[in-house]
Amino acid sequence: MVTTYDNISNYITTMKAQEETIMADVRDILELERPPTPEITKEAILGSEKVKKKPITTKVSKRPEGMHREVFALLYTDNKDAPPLFPTDTGQGYKQLRAKLGMRRVRPWRWMPFTNPARSDGAVFHHWKRITDEARDYPFAKFNKQVPVPTYTDNEYLQHLHNDSWSRQETDHLFDLCRRFDLRFIVIRDRWDRSRFPDRSVEDLKERYYDICAVLNKLKAGSSHETKVYVFDADHERRRKEQLKRIFERTSEQIEEEQTLINELKRIEARKKEREKKQQDLQKLITAADNQAETRKSEKKLTKKKLQHQIRPRIDPNVVETAGIKFPDFKGSGVSLRSQRMKLPASVGQKRTKAIEQLLQELFIELNPMPTEDICVHFNELRSDMVLLYELKTALATCEYELQTLRHQYEALNPGKIFEDLGGPHFHLGEQGSTPKLCFRRE
């Protein structure tokens, strides 16, 4: 039976293989797509006895409405991991804990009397204390820190500490209060005996105490040793408190007036800085104009023979920059057009560009001339001078406007006097690099 079964299975396998081969040939003839043929095995023919297990799919929890994504991520993850929080509940409460009793004998406690070494009245108190700690002092007495107040003898007082405005009894009373209240001078003044002695301020008490301490320290240290002495300035302290009292007692009108004065001061300082900046800009313009005038004069002094033998020097970019325009340099930028040297940079601005165009039209000069080497150099020089002329005209108009304003203010403050009676204003430039100032000449 076994042999017959094997023969039948082999025959069926052979027939299926031939059928697959025939079908493959037919698909190749008809040019049809050939599906991928699975590998022919015994399990594919007879079928596998094992049942395929279905994959276990985890149910994804859905985020409830109204909960933020970050909060939901702290509670759940895709793998149902534990929340990333530090566990606070260990499962052991105070009810589950038991007292750990040892086998040693319990140390006995006793209700004992004690005294505080910090107290001088000898008061006796009681508390629970171990019998083994009976000989120990009160542990909180170490926190009683006292300020060392110096003492003096009768001879020291008569020779070094005598003061006409302070009596001996009044000084003794001061030092007694200093020892009782640890140099708390506000409390000392409050407990001052006004029935026996005149009323003293806090500054008077401090001044008398620290003067005596300084004298006693010098006497104890001697002449050979240098000691640091604390000097109390009573007058400064009185002025400071008086100033604080005035500030505290200000009315709302005074506070508003002070704020108004502060704002006015800020405006004055801002105008001063702006004026200084304008003067510096004006000085730069004047210096640039002087430098260019000197270069023009030096060039005119050269003779024609020297001009033929000498090569014309190229314009220094730093000089052009002081004149108001910095033209781009195309030396190391590769191949470029010569006309790009005459292109105005963006830093010139729209107002200066319009002023240059207007002056060129008045002089009947083309806006874009032929860009030869000499024309490029001279045209850039000309436009730099035009910008300098434009800025000088603007500065002159500003100075004339300020001068007119000062004339009206002077005539308003001094009626009957004319501004020109002072000899007329003039600008004093001074040395090179100095700030020009508006001066008046008196005749």
Image (cartoon, grey):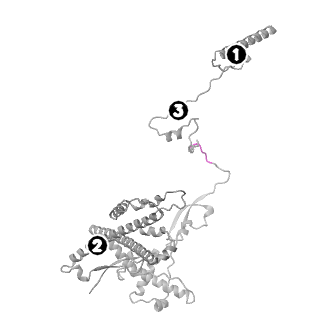
- Of labels 2 and 3, earlier in sequence is 3
Of the two numbered discs 2 and 1 in the rendering, the one whose residue sits closer to the viewer: 2
Dot 2 alpha-carbon crowd within 10 angstroms: few under 14, some 14 to 19, many 20 or more: few
Q: Which mark is residue 76?
A: none
Dot 1 alpha-carbon crowd within 10 angstroms: few under 14, some 14 to 19, many 20 or more: few
Residue 48 is inside the magenta segment: no
Secondary structure beneath disc 1? loop
What kind of residue is marked 2? Glu
Of the two numbered discs 1 and 3 in the rendering, the one whose residue sits closer to the viewer: 1
Q: Are marks 1 and 3 in contact (CB under 8 Å)?
A: no
- Of labels 2 and 1, earlier in sequence is 1
What kind of residue is marked 3? Ser
Q: Which mark is residue 400?
A: 2
Image quarter of the N terminus: top right
Q: Which mark is residue 61?
A: 3
Q: Is residue 256 above or below residue 415?
A: above
Q: Give, as a single range, the part of the protein colored magenta.
A: 95-99
Residue 96 is inside the magenta segment: yes
